[in-house]
Amino acid sequence: MTIMEKAAGRRGFLIGAAAAGTALVIGFRLELLSFAGRARGALRKNTGDYNAFIRIASDSSITVVCKHIEFGQGPFTGFATIIADELDARPEQIKVEHAPADAAKYANLLLGEQGTGGSTAMANSWDQLRKAGAEARARLVAAAAKAWGVPASAIAIDNGILKHSSGKSAEFGEFVAAAQALALTEKPKPKDPSQWRYIGKGFPRVDVKPKTNGEAIYTLDVNLPDMLTCVIARPTRFGAKVKSFDGAPALAIGGVAEAFATPLGVAVLAKGYWAARKGADAVKVEWDETGTESRSTGQILAECKELVKGRGASAAAIGNTASAFRKAAKIIEATYTFPYLAHAPMEPNNCVIRRTPNGVELMLGSQLQTVDQAAAAAILGLKPEQVAIKTLFAGGSFGRRATPNGDMATEAALVMKAAKHQGPIKIVWSREDDIRGGRYRPVFVHRVKAGIDAAGNIVAWEQVIAGQSFNKESPSEGGIDEAMVEGAANMPYAIPNLAVSVHEAKVGVPTLWWRSVSHTHTAFAVETFLDELAAAAGQDELALRRKLLAGHPRHLAVLNLAAENASWGTPMPEGKARGIAVHSSFSSFVAHAVEVSAGADGLPKVERVVTAVDCGQPINPQIIEAQMEGGVGFGLSAALFGAIDLKDGRVVQSNFDSYRQLRINEMPRVEVHIVPSAEHPTGVGEPGVPPIAPAVANAWAKLTRKRIRDLPFIRALTKT
């Protein structure tokens, strides 16, 4: 048996055991908070069946069903931490598996559909899981109490063992059948925080073992009988279509079975990846590039620079900036440019599709299961529920797998529909396909102007932003895509006169949200410009932030915590400087204080990062620390090196040799400090990214007196 077949067998046993009544299955209903109505508190009712999150088997093992994809950000461990705590279970009892695609049962309560994104995994699951764990505990205790003839209040659970003072004890498995059958007389309440054993303290990461011993199943591991691998010969300009092609050179390669045109390019099916790859490279294709983007990056940026010379559609307006500028003693202005960025996850796109008696099954790292179901169903003429999805581990995403059109599901369905082959098909992208495949963080240009009065106070701030929209198909009320201005239009600083506006550039390059979305560029523009204003006003940058954040205690708390632990204000050794930045995204608050020196390559050498994070109630501190560290590394890669360039509409970069990433010896020491909080948990996957680039730029400005306004650093410093 293959690894995949063995894994499928294990899952089948657990599901079968639950169906046969030998397992305790726990679930409940919760209303869905729609994404569109989230800010207004609008609720959309869930009319589906119960959400099954916990299965306790007769061997006392506990299977937690995770509705969010695990691609390294830690929801498997977060789910396990909460359930283990509510049940007082042993860590080794807990197993976690991906939920099937079923929005009625497993919807993300903040998105209104099944999916992972926006750092919402734990935020939307916190109450669900605690209630599910409390119910499982109550049922087990009630079953034991009935069997032993004692009050439920007299039974305790310790390390997964039900115990009574009489000396009676039992594992969970002894009572699962009885617990499933009984009716609870009271609604179970989750534990009081004073009783927590794991939450906020620690729990071993559950995906370490399978990812290190080979048990973890990724899409590339799937090997099914009669399966062919598909590689697509893709156009070099976005949106180009196959005009004509000659598949004979591909079919002449051993192992190649088919070559045919699809809306995405010429698909080559073969026995194994290498034959399919060689076949795709051998196909001769004439492309129809009518209407495709043919400009180079410089031309696109030039258009955006022209746009920001005048105000765009209003995103925020406070006071009267025109009047305030007329009265200002000093006016400072700066223009910032930001390049296209690829997500570049370690595992490029891939998907397996196969026919089933009911329809089809997709096996992939699905980030938006509801979207993927609908996309494949529409192409194949099926109902969404006829598209089963087996969500597998994925090697990163950073937004790349969360495509609004279900890119990989669409691609797999198109290939299956056109192929003669009736068996399973595995679609595989190469690294080059990924880097050149589009869906980038768009280019952006910011023009920022501020007025300072004679006392050094910021009296006016105008910010004009130009770039591509992330959400062209669903602009918010008023026509503003809020994903283009978040972090600027809602900046926390107490500036009496503020105007933020935006222009949407019309560019034929496919874009997508990228880890922390527009916060990636708005935080840089706001936080570096604020440092520049502090210098112009003769003020300490930390003191200025403290004054302007007086009405935002959570921003202020992380700022002060980072500064304190970085020994802000104490002298630095010769050749080093400190920088600081604070930013809120996805309802979490992060500040980075950094220590920077000049590297031998002329770039900033980031030696130390002191991070403070407020993400509400911490669930698993180790996961929080890991995500902050990962955010620092990810953000530094982009800030120092990241840029995707177009030449005549064609992407220049192709692999990690030309799309440079931070190397392990370049990773700074990161110290993470978590703010204690009883607030509802918020996300940590994205909020660590936005403040790192501006903190480094601010330190670099103090060290060298050079202000970085064009990212990445490597190009800004090469130009000067």
Image (tube, rainbow, N blue to C red):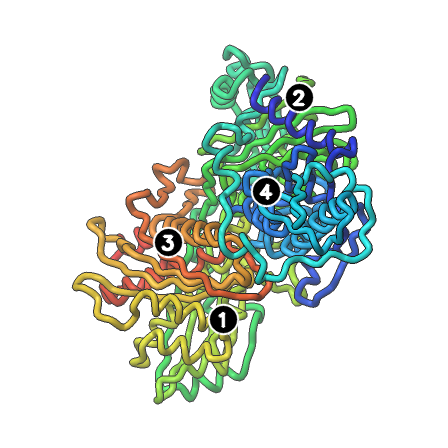
Q: Compare residues 710 and 672 and report the one nearer the observer.
A: 672
Q: Mark 3 points at which residue?
A: 639
Residue 161 vertical position relative to residue 686 in the rendered view, above or below? above
In the rendered structure, which amino acid carries the disc numbered 4?
Answer: Ile
Image quarter where the N terminus lies is: top right
Q: Name the residue under label 2.
A: 419
What is the CA distance from the residue labelled 3 to the residue labelled 4?
A: 27 Å
At a point 25% along the width and 64% down the height, the residue shown is: 577
SS category of the residue bearing label 2: loop
Q: In this view, does 434 lie to the left or right of 82?
A: left
In x, y percent, where is residue 330? 35, 83
In the rendered structure, which amino acid carries the disc numbered 1?
Answer: Arg
Q: Is residue 379 left or right of residue 182?
A: left
SS category of the residue bearing label 1: helix
Residue 16 vertical position relative to residue 303 in the rendered view, above or below? above
Q: Name the residue under label 4.
A: 69
Residue 249 in view, yes or no: yes
In the rendered structure, which amino acid carries the disc numbered 3?
Answer: Ala
Q: Compare residues 394 and 421 and report the one nearer the observer.
A: 394
What is the CA distance from the residue labelled 1 to the residue labelled 2?
A: 56 Å
Q: Mark 1 points at which residue?
A: 554
Q: Earlier in the sequence, mark 1 or mark 2?
A: 2
At a point 72% along the width and 32% down the height, the residue shown is: 15
What is the CA distance from the residue labelled 2 to the residue labelled 4?
A: 29 Å
